[in-house]
Image (cartoon, rainbow, N blue to C red):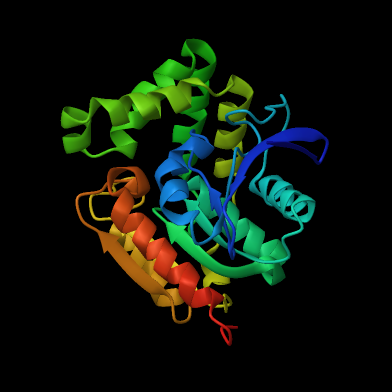
Amino acid sequence: MQATINGISIAYHDQGKGPPIVFLHAFPLNRTMWAQQEAALSSNFRVITIDLRGHGESDAPLWHYSLDQAADDLRGLLDHLSIPQAVFVGLSMGGYILLAFHRKYADRVKGMVLADTRAQADTPEGKEGRFQMAQIAYKQGASAIADIMIPKLLSPATIRTRPEIVQQVRTMIEGNQMSGIVGDLMAMAERPDSVPLLKQITCPTQIIVGDLDQATPPSEAKLMAEQIPHARLAIIPDAAHLANIEQPEIFSAIVGEFAANVARPGTP
Ligand code: MLT
């Protein structure tokens, strides 16, 4: 499915009936990373997965990208789908976008799942790393980005023993256009510190992290869980950064239980 949002074509998938759950993918992937959650949850929920601007089958215009712009795209798509409020699940960059979305449009957020992500802005070294990665992307292409990212996204055991998952992730990365990859890197490097926002979050919030996640380690998840009022924290064993792909049943069960609780009448 495609919709014209903010002047570009945004691809999404809308499946199932029930309270809506909207999934925001990681860098530099696409909406198909949520295939297992879609399959597990769409019998009880309306599951919407989106190719963010610059990814998958959405347009990847060669221009400036920002997380606020991604938040505006998300709002535009919700309006297009006539969804006033939803539960959102954002993993890593998807989590950064979810925090940006909450900052701008808190009234649209019924509940949040922040997975394998962090609230802090990039450090100076982190920003320098983004710059270097953009140069590699420009000079060597998306497959060089896949070589760098796969060991950050997946656990050593998955890389060793589950070639089909490694290939799935590589295919997603290599399917992205350069404008989107570089645009994301700039957008993430420019993102503000969201730590001051955390104490102001009043919607139900679930934090999830893989215990082996080195990109956004459990310490970052614990910080968010401590700062966000009444947030719950789940640490998934034997999962690294892409916890939803490495441990899909556990991840889907946590999201399903959270979204069912949020949907109960009387939940703010
Ligand atoms: C992601 O998975 O979205 C990225 O690792 C996030 C980041 O690079 O900060």
Residue located 58% across and 87% down the image? 266
Nearer the observer, 128 or 231:
231
Residue 5, quarter of the rendered image: top right
Q: Inspect this view and state whether residue 121 appears.
A: no
Residue 104 rendering spot, x and y as whole percentages: 71, 62
Look at the picture and state if 242 lies above or below 44: above
Could you say where residue 227 lies in the image, as x and y percent from the top left?
45, 75
Q: Position of residue 263 (x, y in %)?
A: 55, 75
Task: Indicate left or right for 217 with 114 as reference.
Answer: left
The answer to which quarter of the image holds residue 66 is: top right
In the rendered view, tell whether residue 226 sits above or below residue 249: below
Give the camera-side residue of 218 and 18: 18
Query: Where is the C terminus found, in terms of image quarters?
Result: bottom right
Q: Residue at 56% of width from left, 60% of height from top?
A: 88
Q: How many marks?
A: 0
Name of the residue lying farthest toward the top: 139
Q: Is residue 66 left or right of residue 34?
A: right
> Picture quarter containing residue 63?
top right
Q: Is residue 258 left or right of residue 165?
A: right
Which image quarter holds the N terminus? top right
Residue at (24, 25) in percent of width and height:
163
Q: Is residue 140 visible?
A: yes
Residue 36, placed above or below residue 181? below
Residue furthest to the right in view is: 7
Q: On the rendered structure, is 241 left or right of 136?
A: left
